[in-house]
Amino acid sequence: MYKAVRDAVRVRLMGALMRRVRAARRDAGMVTSEYAVGIIAAVAFAAVLYKVVTSGQVQAELQEIVGRALSGGE
């Protein structure tokens, strides 16, 4: 009786493990594509931020802020 119960539990555990392995294999390509989309979005955001920071008006404002900070806030 003990052996029958042990074998039944083993079969159920192996079945659950195999289902998880199959599910992981199905999703294996998703992670790479999600990373790619995230990297593309980050690069696009960095490019927009770079353009904004290097624009003339923003540079003038940043220089004014740094100048006030260095002069003691006067």
Image (cartoon, rainbow, N blue to C red):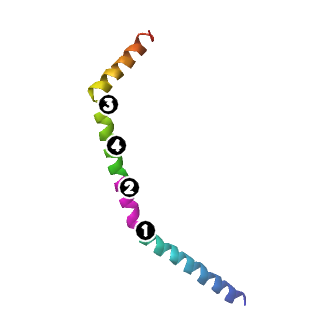
Disc assigned to residue 27 = 1
Q: CA distance from mark 1 to mark 2?
A: 13 Å
| Residue type, label 4 | Phe
**Disc 4 secondary structure class:** helix
- What residue is rendered at 28% in x and 30% in y? 54
Marks 4 and 3, the one that precedes in the sequence: 4
Asked if the residues shown at circle 4 and circle 3 are in contact, with their CB atoms under 8 angstroms apart, the answer is: no
Crowd class of label 3 (few under 14; some 14 to 19; many from 20; radius 10 Å): some
Q: Is residue 42 magenta?
A: no
Instruction: Examine the residues drawn in magenta and state their main secondary structure.
Output: helix
Q: CA distance from mark 3 to mark 2?
A: 27 Å
Q: Residue under circle 4? A: 45
Crowd class of label 1 (few under 14; some 14 to 19; many from 20; radius 10 Å): few
Crowd class of label 4 (few under 14; some 14 to 19; many from 20; radius 10 Å): few
Tell which tag, 1 or 3, sits nearer the viewer.
3
| Residue type, label 2 | Tyr
Residue 23 image point, x, y percent: 47, 72
Q: Residue under circle 2? A: 35
**Disc 1 secondary structure class:** loop
- What residue is rendered at 68% in x and 89% in y? 4
Q: Residue under circle 3? A: 53
| Residue type, label 1 | Asp
- What residue is rendered at 30% in x and 25% in y? 57
Q: Is residue 34 magenta?
A: yes
Q: Which residues are magenta?
A: 28-37
The answer to which quarter of the image holds residue 46 is: top left
